[in-house]
Image (cartoon, rainbow, N blue to C red):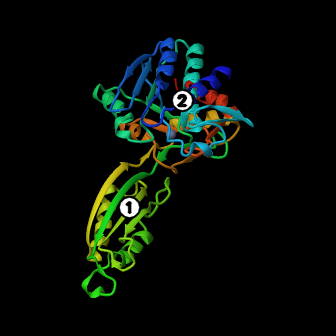
Amino acid sequence: MGDLLELTKELIRKPSITPNDAGCMDLIILRLKKLGFSIELFPAGAAQNLWARFGTQKPLVCFLGHTDVVPTGPIDKWTSPPFSPEIRDGYLYGRGACDMKAGVAAIIVAIENYVRNNPTSNGSIAVLLSSSEEGDSSIGTPVVVAALEKRHEKIDYCITAEPSSDKCLGDIIRNGRRGSLNAKLIIYGKQGHVAFPHNADNAIHKSLAVLHELVIKKWDNGHTNFPETKLQISNIQAGTGANNVIPGELQCEFNFRFSPSVTVDELKKCVAKILEQHKLNYKIDWQLSGEPFFTAPGKLTQTAIQVIQDELGITPELSTGGGTSDARFIAPTGAQVIELGVSNQTAHQIDERVKVDDLEKLVLVYEKILEQLL
Ligand SMILES: [Zn+2]
């Protein structure tokens, strides 16, 4: 336990605000090299990415993680400094404690234990780490995935150490994620004096009905394994700040979290149709941040559920809720993918923390999953 806790603390001490790795991977590389892993680095932009592999046989079990963290927010709001790990009341505090330096430390210690106890096992183990998961993911995991695809190196099972759990360790395993699609919409009118509306065209007024229609629309008919597709408006800007000017333009940003029941193209077409029906002069720009993915229950989910039942005495729920993760880049390669890690209740928050007792339990779960899969 001492070593596991120390590794987690050492990682938290490195202020690896995305996309800066801040030396986290050096620590990990040192340990994986000792085990006999081959190490490859794929730097891209300001990010560092690591592919480390042990063994050449199939199946290949890959642990996926990231060393970067989100910014701290106002440091004076933290009870203890975010990059000075501290234990209070059974919790380890620090930025990245739960998302996901505890997970990264658990991966490394679980692999060390497994390799020590099973020096001649079948199959291979890999570790894929990126320092650009929380920000610009294009310089992160996809860079490694592209290199693997190019040389036909296939991951069979991928365990992402994202904090998937909710109330207690292992209560939720994620086996899919909704897609995420962003839109920037500008609706044009004509600026003018509020006293002479006949000479102007109020961009706010013309937007109200169409935005309302977008908000109440049902975008899919549900999916057995996913929550329904939802649109959320995140930002609206219009007006000059003066109270006697009719605004000539309204800018609106919205996001879709969508299930595999609809495609990106269908969503875009449907929005365009609604905008056309309202006869608006508009411009819309789309940005796709992730396609949905889904790993049907199979060997990987079954193994993880069984291990959690045996080791933690609870039965996890398979879920496709929550935000995006780098698992979305691995799933399209044909791998079975799950996210399994500590509780996400304080992820990205001030006073982020992880239950100290969960660290060893997570190591045990990862170790047993390796034993079952290989
Ligand atoms: Zn994360």
Would you call the spot at circle 2 few (<14 residues within 10 Å), some (14-19), or many (20 or more)? Answer: many
Quarter assignment of residue 133:
top left
Q: Amino acid at mark 1?
A: Glu
Asked if residue 165 shows in the view, the reply is: no
* Residue appearing at x 66%, y 28% in the figure: 360
Mark 1, Cα crowd under 10 Å, few <14 / some 14-19 / many 20+, is some
Q: Nearer the viewer, residue 27 or 1?
A: 27
Whether 284 is drawn above or below 179: the answer is below
Asked whether the viewer can see residue 210, the reply is yes
Residue at image mark 1: 253
Secondary element at tag 1: strand
Expressed as whole percent of the image width and height from the top left, the position of residue 139 reads 35, 35
Q: Relative to the observer, which residue lies in front, 338 or 4? A: 4
Q: Which residue of the protein is positioned furthest toward the right in this rendering?
A: 89
Instruction: Answer left or right for 331 relative to 281.
Output: right
Give the mark nearer the N terminus: 2 vs 1.
Answer: 2
Residue type at mark 2 is Val
- Quarter of the rendering occupied by the N terminus: top right
Question: Which residue matches tag 2?
Answer: 104
Comparing 63 with 71, the one in front is 71
